[in-house]
Amino acid sequence: MTVKVRFAPSPTGKLHVGNVRTALVNWLFAKGQGGSFVLRIDDTDLARSTPEFEQGIEDDLTWLGLLWDERHNQSRRFDRYEEAAARLKASGRLYACYETSEELDRRRKVQLSRGLPPIYDRAALELTEAEKAAYEAEGRRPHWRFKLEGKRVAWEDLARGHAEVDTASMSDPVLIREDGLFLYTLPSVVDDIDMAITHIIRGEDHVTNTGAQIEIFEALGATVPGFAHMPLLVGADGAALSKRLGSLSISDMREQGYEPIAITSHLGKIGTSDALEVGASVQALGDSFAFSKMGRSPARYDTADLDRLNAQALHAMDYAVAQPRLAALDADLGQAFWEVVRPNLQKFADVVGLAAIVRGPVAPVIEDAAFAAAALEALPETVDETLWPTWTNAVKEKTGAKGKGLFMPLRLILTGQPHGPDMAAIAPMIGRERIVRRLKGETA
Ligand code: GLU
């Protein structure tokens, strides 16, 4: 069997780390075994979906390297949903209901006050044609519910193992609203059938839906696909992330300078038994992905881990990969420079500040004028790779300074900062003229 999965976002907001993790796990699972990945835009809600959000989803997935093999919009497939609805109506599984939401609320309250579960009582199944006609004459339009069989629906979940939902404990789901809008439940199943999806991979908040949707697959005479429901994300404090997800959009993370491979490595590995390390590529992440590595406990999303992976990705980045980005930031000072400064990067753009050390301007920090003067006197005529040991030895002899007392003042004078790249490597790149000016206290 060739694996075929889908990621089905609604274009009603920006992608955040929660839904990107779903996209990613689908992608990794499929691409790890040469399968295909479908992008399905769930835009049946025409009022809330926007072309801008849809474009944003495509841009984010492309930037992350999660390319799709097929792409569909639900808004172009309404005829398929009508057809499926007609079949379900004909078989008696989709039935018209006329209750207003106030009436349903009132009934739920009565049920609860009697200690009964607030599930829909199926009163509409008893309506006569005359009663329905009377409602229509009043101007009411029906909404349509799917008649559940009320049984234990079971499946072998790739992430959770044996899973069961008792559809007898659920209300018959509304598939079509009174204004004719198809809610998510039916179109999703129709698409999964038409697109021959082999595995539905999504968050565990969909487990109950799966019970109803398996019944719909069966009612439409289709093969039921495999399922995997992933544990949800929690924050570093262990609290559910669902309410904070809005502030963790991929476009914001992109602006904050995170590397796509750091994001995909992080989201692909949290909640699994793999070490949190950055992958060589998103395909390499797919090659090592397996549901058997995924635990049942929630995946802990900690920005500190992402920061660490981001730095790791930069520290391993080849010059050939970095070069166009360095050029775009006007910070391409050659391969040797890149290799000296990359261990100091947290975000790629930090390189701009490091390039300033080499080409200026740096405002030197001189804490001891006599020390700076002695260092200037000791500066060799030729500044090359041998500069640092020769020069620091000479300064040591002249001033008696050693260890931190020798190296920190030189770093502060040459770079203006207490931390930074390896001085032995960066000092020759600064060049004699700038070193002299900085030793004299000039910004250079
Ligand atoms: N549009 C649905 C959602 O974002 C898709 C769920 C599914 O994967 O079936 O929740």
Image (cartoon, rainbow, N blue to C red):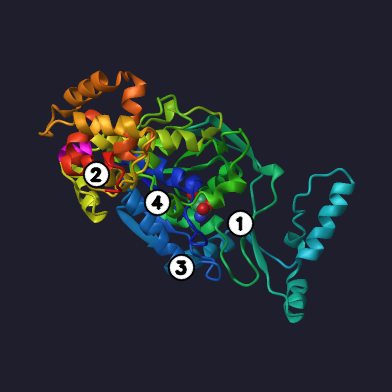
Amino acid beneath label 4 = Arg
**Is 77 one of the magenta-colored residues?**
no
272 or 203: which is nearer to us?
Answer: 272
Residue at image location 76% in from the left, 64% down from the top: 101
Measured Cα–Cα span from mark 1 to mark 4: 47 Å
Read off the residue under disc 2.
Answer: 437
Q: Residues within 10 Å of mark 4 (few under 14, many from 20)?
A: some
Question: What is the x, y in percent for residue 100?
Answer: 76, 67
Measured Cα–Cα span from mark 2 to mark 4: 39 Å
The secondary structure type at the circle numbered 4 is helix
Residue 75: numbered disc: 3
Read off the residue under disc 1.
Answer: 93
Nearest-to-viewer mark from 3 and 4: 4
Q: Earlier in the sequence, mark 2 or mark 4?
A: 4
* Residue 262 showing in the rendered view: yes
**Is 336 one of the magenta-colored residues?**
yes
Read off the residue under disc 4.
Answer: 254
